[in-house]
């Protein structure tokens, strides 16, 4: 019997199901979408019933495209965006809309916590991370203050990975790699920490937390109801699953310390694994890794390739439509040709890639161009977007190198940017390190399918699964001739970034008065 694995990945608006053979070859995938709901400023939510249906639709679509017998799927595993909040009531009832990880309604609560000196003595030494607005602890506190009736209606607190697994199996669990990124878990004991919950003022919610499970634990089987709705086979085992950044790291073959993995997309994800963890105030996240003894050290922000998609949709709509009509070149290939038309030394235009969030160290940072004149060409603008994204990744990796100076060797890179040879070469030239291009279209789905492989006994551990299932398609070497110019441009980027802090504060503090209309 040929064996197959299924990985299910839920992002902020998309749900994907992908089927792999045990060598990591993608057999089929299907993507569906949910509507992002923004009923109030700072809110990003989704309808839970719609989310369930699109996940089942993704599974049905992948099975149909694959043409395989569903009996040959030996394991299923889920992954999804970290943090956010998904509450489940009795018998699978929906308590309220799910909350996505880009939600910022609880930012004032977080500001108060971080200003409390006890945060540094109670929370950080246990969680090894900085709390932020869309983490469950922040959202649960916000619900206590603004929607107090929600508590009594809730049976389980879930992350999205746990929610989808619950829909598949009817069994509740809270997966450890996901949990370790929520400011709920003591990284030393790998368990919920009562003192942390007490500091956040949400100790009552401990009663609603499911038992912790490991990534490769068998956490239930496909139910008869789910089988009828999806085409899966009743009794197929389902693994605990993975945090999406953990799945992405595994999909690049990150199984040894001192190696750097970069994943590009909406988020700039930059990470390595280590047996040593430290309390570092401005580090994005330290989380559990499914290889014994290791933790995942991550620097990340939503500052990566999606900035180009925004620029295209905002400023290049007519060009995109014309290219589609001609059918000769994609808009992304056209953008690369524009970048190639401008030499690195021919433009000093700077772009801050902060459309979806920033890594500038200040909460009020916004995107923008610096240095445009009446003669600035479209190619210079697009080049600035490309460079700004690479510089944002570089800033994260500099921080990782300050923590661990021994990070060396080729960089494993994956994600949407790898479809652009121009962008890949720019990464190699800015970092002046070889890039090993990982041949994968869906990082999260492939990475989490490794959990299914280990759970079902296909492979004995995650290191073996990654070794067998991750493929390097080629290596991009840096061009030494471009080293100095990119060093200069990156230094200029950092200098201009620092100079923007005052301007961003002024913009945030300035309230524009609405005109007063005279009554007749």
Image (tube, rainbow, N blue to C red):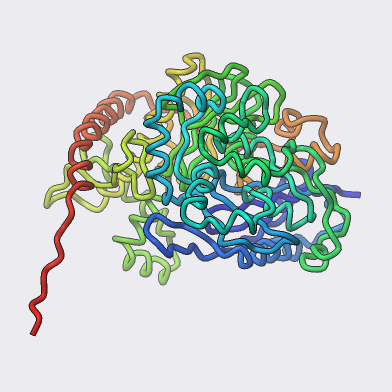
Q: Position of residue 412 (x, y in %)?
A: 55, 31
Please name the residue shown 29% across and 60% down the image: 315
When the figure is inspected, residue 426 is found, relative to residue 155, above or below; the finding is above
When the figure is inspected, residue 440 is found, relative to residue 56, above or below; the finding is above
**In the rendered view, does 56 fall on the left or right side of 334?**
right
Query: Split into 4 quadrants, where in the image is the C terminus?
Result: bottom left
Q: Quadrant of residue 334?
A: bottom left
**In the rendered view, does 449 fall on the left or right side of 118?**
right
Q: Nearer the viewer, residue 342 or 139?
A: 139
Please name the residue shown 74% across and 38% down the image: 213
Please name the residue shown 50% across and 48% down the image: 139
Please name the residue shown 84% across and 38% down the image: 458
**In the rendered view, does 324 fall on the left or right side of 376?**
right
Residue 86 appears anywhere in the view: yes
Q: Quadrant of residue 70?
A: bottom right
Farthest residue toward the top?
A: 406
When the figure is inspected, residue 418 is found, relative to residue 47, above or below; the finding is above
Q: Quadrant of residue 127?
A: top right
Q: Nearer the viewer, residue 105 or 217?
A: 105
Q: Position of residue 275 (x, y in %)?
A: 62, 18
Q: Position of residue 96 (x, y in %)?
A: 58, 62
Q: Position of residue 339 (x, y in %)?
A: 32, 46
Farthest residue toward the bottom?
A: 520
Residue 429 appears anywhere in the view: no
Q: Nearer the viewer, residue 325 or 277?
A: 277
**In the rendered view, does 90 fall on the left or right side of 320?**
right
């Amino acid at each position: 019997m040929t064996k197959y694995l299924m990985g299910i990945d839920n992002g902020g608006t998309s749900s994907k199901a992908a089927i792999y053979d045990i060598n990591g070859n993608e057999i089929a995938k299907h993507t569906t979408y949910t509507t992002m709901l923004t009923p109030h400023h700072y809110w990003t939510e989704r309808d839970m019933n719609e989310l369930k249906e699109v996940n089942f639709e993704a599974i049905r679509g992948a099975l149909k495209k694959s043409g395989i017998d569903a009996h040959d799927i030996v394991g299923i595993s889920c992954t999804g965006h970290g943090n956010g909040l998904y509450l489940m009531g009795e018998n699978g009832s929906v308590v309220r809309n799910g909350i996505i990880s880009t939600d910022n309604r609880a930012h004032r609560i977080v500001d108060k916590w971080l200003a409390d000196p006890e945060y540094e003595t109670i929370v950080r030494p246990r969680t090894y991370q900085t709390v932020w607005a869309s983490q469950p602890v922040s959202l649960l506190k916000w619900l206590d203050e603004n929607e107090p009736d929600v508590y009594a209606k809730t049976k389980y607190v879930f992350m999205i990975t746990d929610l989808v697994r619950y829909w598949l199996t009817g069994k509740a669990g809270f997966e450890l790699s996901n949990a370790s990124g929520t400011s709920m878990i003591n990284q030393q004991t790998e368990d919920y920490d009562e003192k942390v919950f007490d500091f956040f003022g949400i100790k009552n919610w401990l009663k609603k937390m499911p038992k912790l499970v490991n990534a490769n634990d068998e956490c239930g089987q496909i139910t008869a109801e789910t089988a009828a709705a999806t085409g899966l086979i009743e009794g197929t085992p389902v693994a605990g699953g993975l945090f999406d950044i953990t799945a992405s790291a595994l999909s690049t073959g990150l199984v040894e310390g001192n190696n750097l993995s970069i994943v590009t997309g909406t988020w700039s994800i930059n990470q390595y694994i280590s047996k040593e963890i430290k309390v570092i105030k401005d580090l994005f996240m330290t989380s559990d890794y499914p290889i014994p003894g290791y933790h995942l050290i991550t620097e990340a922000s939503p500052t990566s390739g999606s900035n180009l998609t925004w620029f295209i949709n905002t400023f290049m709509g007519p060009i995109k439509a014309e290219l589609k009509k001609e059918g000769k070149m994609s808009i992304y290939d056209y953008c690369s040709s524009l970048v190639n038309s401008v030499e690195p030394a021919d433009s000093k235009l700077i772009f801050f890639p902060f459309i979806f969030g920033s890594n500038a160290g200040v909460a009020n940072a916004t995107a923008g161009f610096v240095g445009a004149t009446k003669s600035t060409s479209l190619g210079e603008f697009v080049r600035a977007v490309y460079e700004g994204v690479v510089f944002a990744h570089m800033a994260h990796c500099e921080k990782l190198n300050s923590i661990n100076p021994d990070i060396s060797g080729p960089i494993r890179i994956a994600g949407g940017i790898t479809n652009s040879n121009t962008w890949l070469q720019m990464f190699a030239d800015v970092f002046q390190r070889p890039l090993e291009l990982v041949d994968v279209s869906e990082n999260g789905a492939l990475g989490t399918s490794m959990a299914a492989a280990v759970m079902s006994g296909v492979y004995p551990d995650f290191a073996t699964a990654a070794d067998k299932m991750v493929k390097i398609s080629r290596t991009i070497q840096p061009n030494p001739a471009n080293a100095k110019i990119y060093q200069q441009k990156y230094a200029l980027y950092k200098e201009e970034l620092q100079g923007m802090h005052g301007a961003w504060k002024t913009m945030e503090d300035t309230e524009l008065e609405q005109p007063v209309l005279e009554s007749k």
